[in-house]
């Protein structure tokens, strides 16, 4: 879908900009990573479902330490899927690539740890104000179990716990904040491995760099 959108923009004589997204998503688009298709194994999922997130994470660490480094260790759904894949095709394979046939400029925005933490808090409060708790209530009402909601990870897990009375509102806030900061740290570790990314702090630096890139 992203590639179709990129080509559509080019046909209009415009320059596509891919903004945000996880490190792997950006890499998948830019480098054209061909991800192997692994259909769900419901029997295996049923067995793995009985284990705790800690047991699942330790199991993944043993058989695919590389994948364990990048996964959200408390997200049961993702851990089960990762184990399902590893049991079908082995540890994370060297993926085939079909890179974009265009020059690409990759810019990263430098943020200090304190500033990043503050931005995460700001985003969290904004999302709560816009009705994130009501969204989780609605999902619960539509038939999703608390267990399933908690498996979604990050905000959903702790909002579900708050709505069940397992934690207080302020505790929910702090837990989401902490988990989001850990997630951001893992993302930065991923981004830093990609030497094509040019890290900038000032808007003017970005404007000059883009201008130079477009004039080539």
Image (cartoon, grey):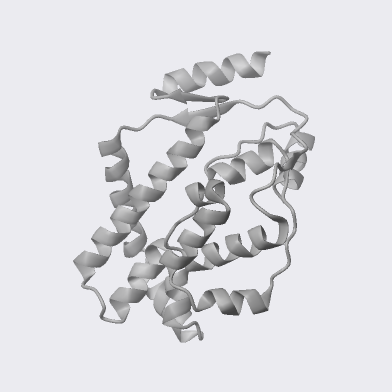
At 52% across and 68% down in the image, what residue appears? 77
What residue appears at the point 20 percent right and 65 percent down from the top-left corner?
170
Residue 171: which quarter of the image? bottom left
The answer to whether 107 is drawn above or below residue 74 in the figure is: above
Residue 196 relative to residue 32: left or right = left
Quarter of the image that includes the C terminus: top right
> Does 1 appear above or below 52?
above
Q: Position of residue 86 (x, y in %)?
A: 64, 58
Q: Position of residue 66 (x, y in %)?
A: 55, 46
Q: Residue at x 39, y 24 (%)?
A: 201
Give the number of callouts: 0
User: Percent from the top left, x then y, of residue 74?
Assistant: 42, 62
Q: Describe residue 212's horizontal placement relative to residue 170 as left or right.
A: right
Q: Residue furthest front?
A: 62
Asked where in the image residue 156 lies, by quadrant, the reply is bottom left
| Residue 51 seen in the figure | yes
Q: Compared to 23, does 169 lie above or below?
A: below
Residue 138 visible at all: no
User: Relative to 40, is 128 on the left or the right?
Assistant: left
At horizontal 47% and vertical 60% (from top left) the residue drawn is 57
Q: Is residue 107 above or below residue 33?
A: above
Q: Quadrant of residue 45?
A: bottom right
């Amino acid at each position: 879908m992203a590639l179709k959108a990129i080509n559509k923009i080019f046909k209009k004589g415009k320059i596509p900009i891919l903004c945000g997204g996880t490190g792997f998503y950006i890499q998948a688009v830019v480098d054209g990573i061909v991800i192997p298709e692994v259909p769900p194994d419901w029997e295996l999922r049923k067995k793995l479902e009985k284990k705790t997130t800690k047991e699942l994470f330790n199991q993944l660490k043993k058989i695919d330490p590389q994948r364990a480094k990048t996964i959200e260790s408390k997200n049961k759904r993702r851990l089960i899927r990762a184990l399902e894949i590893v049991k079908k095709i082995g540890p994370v394979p060297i993926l085939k690539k079909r890179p974009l046939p265009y020059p690409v400029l990759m810019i990263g925005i430098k943020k200090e740890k304190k500033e990043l933490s503050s931005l995460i808090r700001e985003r969290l409060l904004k999302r709560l104000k816009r009705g994130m708790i009501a969204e989780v209530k609605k999902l619960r009402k539509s038939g999703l179990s608390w267990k399933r909601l908690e498996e979604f990870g990050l905000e959903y897990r702790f909002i579900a716990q708050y709505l069940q009375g397992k934690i207080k509102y302020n505790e929910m806030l702090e837990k989401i904040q902490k988990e989001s900061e850990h997630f951001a740290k893992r993302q930065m570790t991923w981004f830093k491995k990609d030497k094509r990314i040019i890290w900038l702090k000032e808007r003017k630096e970005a404007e000059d760099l883009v201008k130079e890139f477009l004039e080539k």
